[in-house]
Image (cartoon, coloured by chain):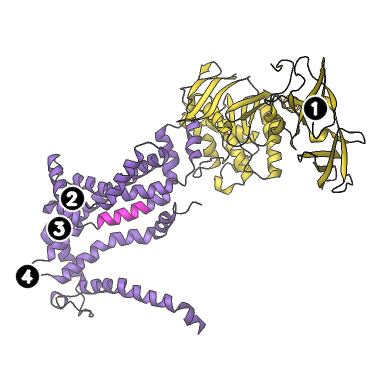
Chain colours: A yellow, B purple
Amino acid sequence: MAGLELKSLYKSYGEVEVIKGVDLSVDHGEFVVFVGPSGCGKSTLLRMIAGLEEITGGELWIGDTLCNAVEPRDRGIAMVFQSYALYPHMTVYENMGFGLKLAKTPKDVRDAKIREAARILQMENLLERKPGQLSGGQRQRVAIGRAIVRKPEVFLFDEPLSNLDAALRVDMRMELSKLHDELGSTMIYVTHDQVEAMTLADKIVVLNGGVVQQVGSPIELYQRPANLFVAGFIGSPKMNFAPVNVDRVEGTSVTISGKDIAAMTLEIPLNAVQAGDVLTIGVRPHDLVPSPSGAIVGRIGLIERLGNETNVNIELPSGASWLAVLDGDQALQRGASLIMNLDRAKIAVFDAGGQAVTAEKPLA
Amino acid sequence: MSFIRKYWLSAVAILVSVVVFLVPFAFIVLTAFKDPKQASLLDFSWPQGNYLWGNIVEVVTTRNWMLVTAFVNSSILTVASVALLVIFGAMVGFVLQRRKTRLNGLIEFLILAGLMIPPAVVPTIWLLQGIQLFGRLHGLILIEVAYGLPFTILLYRAFISTIPRELDEAAIIDGARPFDVFFKVILPLLWPVTVTNIVVQSVAIFNDFTNPLYYLPGNANATVQLTLYNFQSQFNTSYNLLFTNIVLITIPPLIVFLFFNRQIVAGMTAGAVKG
């Protein structure tokens, strides 16, 4: 039984700081996904947990052990690499048994564990093959099998599905989810694919520039992003943003307007904003609905008709471009003007610093 | 017509290589069959009678079976030197490729220096005498290892750069200690370039004439190439025996080449282009 505790972890290469103080606690059995754009430090953070990168500052606790200076083999972890990293000169059986062999596990125990893992992953028929004779999906399976055999406290996945084709990726995603249920171990998973993050995670950690932006369940992140970065990163297609001014504040009802948005009243926590503040509002493409009396008027740009939904690019008066996803197939004319209404309850509001405006964090 | 136009250059190339490589070899073999009188003419002629067996017996038994001693010495020298070269070359190549430190530049300079700067014989002898290794076989083994190491390291390092680092890391996570990573994961994957190294270095060391001449004096210490001196002197050279000797000592490297020919090319080009 092992959770994971990261206490203000730092990593720097010489002058360059890559991880700038990450605090995170992971409970036993949780499936945690690190997401972020490339270069945000998510892989580095994972490798620090694995012990492949030295920790410059802070503490890493796995279970009840301070693991900063513990060798990777003693951390109770197993890792699955993006490139699978199977040993090409060994058969699948030897690949999976390599760690146990190094640990001098008796041969019969080793054999039982390998066959058990092969059974879980349904690849008993592949055991005598070499990695070169396997397809991408099968290799990935072997890599996961190699991790399972070690019976680790924590599984680490470094973008394990990004070398697979789209269809296989969906299958493996479901299998990973099943595997997590079956094994009940803690899993940490790095990806830049937010669909993977949303579908697999109990808890998502959004990273940008070596800093944790937000930690929460997938739906929490989707519905209540903590800042502009998370709002723009989570959700596909991207959230639309527009700058607005605060015209009038009466208790909790605040009237806003902007170049692209007709004056409207929103419910914002008491004392969170003042008249004259500049805010940014965010609206999900799915929350825009065509309506004759809407707050937003724009010209229709590119139209993508997908059958079940229609993606419409709308050029707003300020020159900004928004995307609306409309239900069903809509016959629209390019260049025509479109009036849209937005669901007020679902509008996200951010202050000038990009932080979500909430009751806990009122503007000074 | 088009056939000739297409292949005339290849035909010329084959012809030239036959003249350059096979004619001298034919000359050696022909002369080994001759008696002393005909051999001393040094011409490209058919032997008058077969004296090969007699020549072989004389070559082998000369100076109290010196050629046999020489074969034993050369075999020990070659096997020991090549084994050390492979192990050390692969290790140095591995560490040099994987671990980037401030010393890397200096080490790479020293390796290149080892390739480019000709060895200084007299100081080396002085050094060997100082550590009691002069005129001993293991001293010469160390010399051969030192001279062969730069080339071996370069070959290994180029090849190791094509082995993804994730393999090392996977092994480390699996619980491998540094020596496990090297001997159980990396070294087996280096097989193609190891074969190249074995062939290139064993042929070079087996055929080495000058280093045994400088560093391993004395009849008991002779290596095969030095036995050639048995049949040459200032006023009189037994060409039939000399060429028989050449035939005999050419056979082992020739066999090595014939067996490993394919792998040599594979190892030489592997690592040249990242695949």
Residue at point 34%, 52% (across, down):
B198
User: According to the image, label 1 marks what residue?
Assistant: A347
What is the chain letter for disc 1? Answer: A
Badges 3 and 2, same chain = yes
User: According to the image, label 4 marks what residue?
Assistant: B235
For numbered disc 2, what is the local secondary structure?
loop
Q: Do the residues labelled 3 and 2 touch (CB within 8 Å)?
A: no
Q: Give the range drawn in magenta.
A: B196-209
Residue at point 9%, 66% (across, down):
B233
Which numbered tag is attached to residue A82?
none
Q: Is residue A120 left or right of residue B268?
A: right
Distance CA(mark 4)–CA(mark 3)? 24 Å
Q: Are marks 2 and 1 in contact (CB under 8 Å)?
A: no
Counting other residues with Cα less than 10 Å from the Cα at mark 3, is it few (<14), some (14-19), or many (20 or more)?
few
For numbered disc 4, what is the local secondary structure?
loop
Mark 2: amino acid = Ala
Badges 3 and 1, same chain = no
**A116 or A154, which is in the foreground?**
A154
Q: Which residue lies furthest to the bottom in this view?
A: B1
Q: Are marks 3 and 1 in contact (CB under 8 Å)?
A: no
Q: Which of marks 4 and 3 is in front?
A: 4
User: According to the image, label 2 marks what residue?
Assistant: B120
User: According to the image, label 3 marks what residue?
Assistant: B65
Q: Which residue lies furthest to the right in this view?
A: A292
